[in-house]
Amino acid sequence: MKIPYSEDQVKLARFAKAMGHPARIKILEILSNQECCYSGNIAEEFPIALSTLSQHLKELKKSGLIQGEINPPRIKYCINEDNWKVAKKLFDAFLVDKLNQSEDCTS
């Protein structure tokens, strides 16, 4: 019998997929260093088209790592602190568990 994925495995995969591009990592770094930021200000930090940046922001928002508030004509983004904490907990647990298991394999 096949075992379905756990809720934590699904969440961890969603966060990892969202973080799977260097531009998204940079966006997360920018947002984690300030309370909130407008998309136009974020765009100044990147050598990519605004439409490409918008797609990266959309993926991060879809994953739940960031949230956005529309105040036409601007969109303000910030870290979703609740999901940020969940992601940290899941990554920490996964990486520590895997590290401990690999140490067992080398003996």
Image (spheres, rainbow, N blue to C red):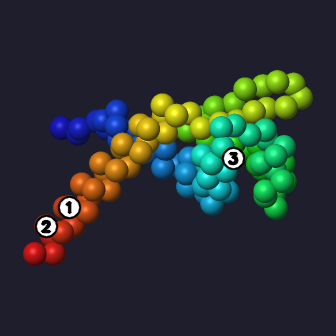
**How far separated are the C-alphas under marks 3 and 2?**
38 Å
Disc 3 element? helix
**How far separated are the C-alphas under marks 3 and 1?**
34 Å
Which residue lies most toward the left here? 107
Of mark 3 and mark 1, the one earlier in the sequence is 3
Q: Disc 2 designates what residue? A: 104
80 relative to 48 in the view: left or right: left
In which quadrant will I find the C terminus? bottom left
Residue type, label 3: His
Q: Disc 3 designates what residue? A: 56
Rate crowding at label 2 as few (under 14), some (14 to 19) or many (20 or more) other CA atoms within 10 Å.
Answer: few
Q: Residue at x 73, y 44 (%)?
A: 55
Q: Are marks 1 and 2 in contact (CB under 8 Å)?
A: yes
The residue closer to the viewer here, 52 or 95, is 95
Q: Disc 1 designates what residue? A: 100
Residue type, label 2: Asp
Q: How many circles with numbers are drawn on the protein? A: 3
| x then y, percent, for residue 101 | 19, 61
| x then y, percent, for residue 105 | 15, 70
